[in-house]
Image (cartoon, helix red, strand yellow):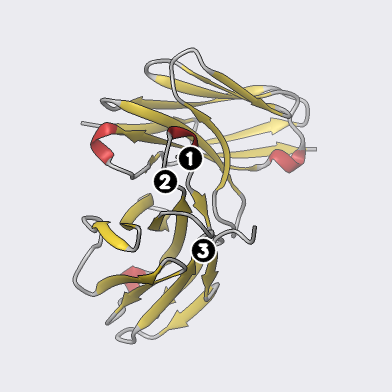
Amino acid sequence: DAGVIQSPRHEVTEMGQEVTLRCKPISGHDYLFWYRQTMMRGLELLIYFNNNVPIDDSGMPEDRFSAKMPNASFSTLKIQPSEPRDSAVYFCASRAGGDPSGNTIYFGEGSWLTVV
Amino acid sequence: EDQVTQSPEALRLQEGESSSLNCSYTVSGLRGLFWYRQDPGKGPEFLFTLYSAGEEKEKERLKATLTKKESFLHITAPKPEDSATYLCAVQATNYGQNFVFGPGTRLSVLP
């Protein structure tokens, strides 16, 4: 199993530019999560999908952030326009549905975003 | 207000010096408590899931326990390779499918 795959691993962009982060969840997982990690706020949920449908986007900070999941094996998180305060590590994670034993969330390696 | 806290914020141990990390939570309807390890530049790596008070899980030098208000991660005779940030997370009835993470404990094990 290849695990959750994210790209790019590192991105440096100028303020005002569009940023697109990509994620391939673990095959067969029904849930996909986007988290953001900063020193100040720790790990916080931005949005999650179930069977490709967005379920809870209450953590998306502003309209500048959007996420899509066009199919079971791909999701994007887009920031447009980007701002320096968006600098953080963005993690994609997935988990299987079903009974409690499948509750574990598995994380990708993260996309390190720096907006200058 | 629901919250998840961890203590200490940072811990420095000598190799072989056993200790415990604490995760305290105030949530209603706990569905699971999870421990993760995060190495610098990496994503969190799953360690344990605990579902009910009194439950214990072990893996190598790590042992996780759960009460109704807190969880402990006991580290026995740690080695330098155990150095990492340890995160706990809770899943509760009010959170849907979300996990709420604590701020983490940064563990350093010196040779």
Picture coordinates of residue B40, whole percent (x, y): 60, 55
- Which picture quadrant has residue A69? bottom left
* Label 1 close to label 2 by CB (< 8 Å): yes
Q: In this rendering, does residue A115 appear at all?
A: no
In this rendering, the label closer to the viewer, 3 or 1: 1
Q: Residue at x 49, y 12 (%)?
A: B54
- Which picture quadrant has residue B31? top left
Q: CA distance from mark 3 to mark 2?
A: 22 Å
* Label 3 close to label 1 by CB (< 8 Å): no
Picture coordinates of residue B20, whole percent (x, y): 59, 23
Instruction: Tell me the element at label 1.
Output: helix
User: Sequence-wise, which precedes: disc 3 or disc 2?
Assistant: 2
- The answer to whether B2 is drawn above or below residue A13 in the figure is above
- The answer to whether A112 is drawn above or below residue A100 in the figure is below
Kindly identify the amino acid type of the residue bearing the numbered disc 1.
Gly
* Label 3 close to label 2 by CB (< 8 Å): no
Picture coordinates of residue A43, whole percent (x, y): 40, 50
- The answer to whether A68 is drawn above or below residue B96 in the figure is below
Q: CA distance from mark 1 to mark 2?
A: 6 Å
Q: Which residue is mark 3?
A: A110
Taking the view exactly as shown, the residue that stands out farthest to the right is B111
User: Sequence-wise, which precedes: disc 3 or disc 1?
Assistant: 1
Rendered image: mark on residue A97: 2
**Residue B56 vs residue B107, the one in the foreground:** B56
Q: Which residue is mark 1?
A: A102
